[in-house]
Image (cartoon, rainbow, N blue to C red):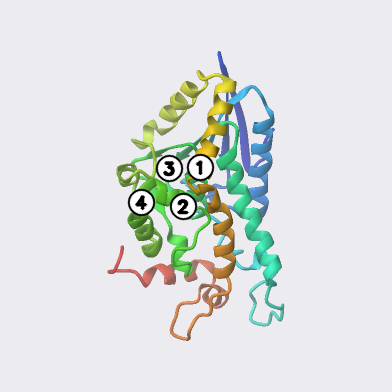
Amino acid sequence: MGTETLIYEKKDYEEGSVVTLTMNKPESLNALNVEFSREIDDALTRVEEDDDVKVVVLKGAGKAFSAGYDLGRAYFVYGAGKGKPEDKTRRPSQRSRLAYDRWRSESLRNIFNLNKITIAQVHGYCIGGGLYMSLCCDLTIAAEDAKIGHSEQRLGFSGAMYVFPIEIMLIGQKRARELLLTGKLIDGTEAERIGLINQVVPPDQLEEETQKLAQSMTLLPRDGIAIGKACARLAYDSMGLSSAFGQGYLGHTMFTNVRYEPEEFNFVKRRRDAGLKNAIRERDARYKGLID
């Protein structure tokens, strides 16, 4: 099982199996476009249905865990044309935006509610949608030099994200708002210090330590894992964390209707006029000397 862009590896131990899902699109820093995200959804369904599997590890090939959702297709995914100056496509409907954003949110909920123990193995960039995936995993182990944060917020979100309540629970309201409003990136050491991840290790030990952690989780009984996950979901429900998924997609849809004033940076227009890479550079250059 698996595809060229999502490697599915199953390793059997004495008391259970571990599946490692490796996002294998290094040329795009494992950016999450629609097709790629559906591959991950399908793989998680297979993991869920395999009774031998107790643990699933999510990792990325190349220089990054994941740089997040594909900004080259942002806004276009709603059926908004191709971004050319001569494009006369109508503005996407609210129903098309809500449908897409709800699917995105449900994909994250699938990770959050998976009846297996989930571990994110983070190195390099872990941004936006990549960070959302990590937040939805039971455990996260990261390299010391990982670059973790919400640079996607500099598109104009200003604090709207898919799983905001989960991040608040982990690091507190002030820290969460700081990461979201600034879009700054922190390393793995800082992420561990503030509670955003469980463990930080030197880069050359990340693979070994993650596999040791995963193997240790196979020592738990299958029923115990299932009961533990069910009880965790009840606890999350009682704390209101499950509302993260509804709030997240509604907030994202509302953001896509932001009206930019003439002096304000509009990423979609700059992408159209200057290209994706230049638009990203211009977006971040505005913060130079202020945040970075």
| Residue at image point 49% right, 36% down | 138
Residue bearing mark 4: 172
Looking at the image, is mark 3 or mark 1 nearer the viewer? 1
Judging by the rendered image, the residue that carries numbered circle 3 is: 123
Category of crowding for the residue at label 4, using alpha-carbon neighbours closer than 10 angstroms: few (below 14), some (14–19), many (at least 20): some
| Residue sitting at the far top | 14
C-alpha distance separating marks 4 and 2: 9 Å
The disc, 1 or 4, on the residue closer to the chain's N-terminal end is 4
Which circle marks residue 115 in the picture? none
In the rendered view, tell whether residue 173 sits above or below residue 159: above
Residue nearest the viewer, comparing 243 with 126: 243
Q: Identify the mark nearer the N-term, 3 or 1.
A: 3
Residue 194 on image: x %, y % = 32, 46
Q: Which residue is mark 1?
A: 236
Q: Are marks 4 and 2 in contact (CB under 8 Å)?
A: no
Amino acid on which disc 1 is placed = Tyr
- Dot 1 falls on a residue whose secondary structure is helix
Q: Residue at x 50, y 66 (%)?
A: 277
Secondary structure, mark 4, is loop
Amino acid at pointer 2:
Pro
Which residue in the protein does label 2 denote?
Answer: 165
Query: What residue is at 53 percent from the left and 80 percent from the top?
Result: 259
Q: Can you name the residue that lies furthest to the bottom here? A: 262
Task: Tell me which amino acid carries mark 3.
Answer: His
Q: CA distance from mark 2 to mark 1?
A: 10 Å
In this rendering, which labeled residue sits more in front, label 2 or label 1?
A: 1
C-alpha distance separating marks 3 and 2: 24 Å
Of labels 4 and 3, earlier in sequence is 3
Q: Earlier in the sequence, mark 4 or mark 2?
A: 2
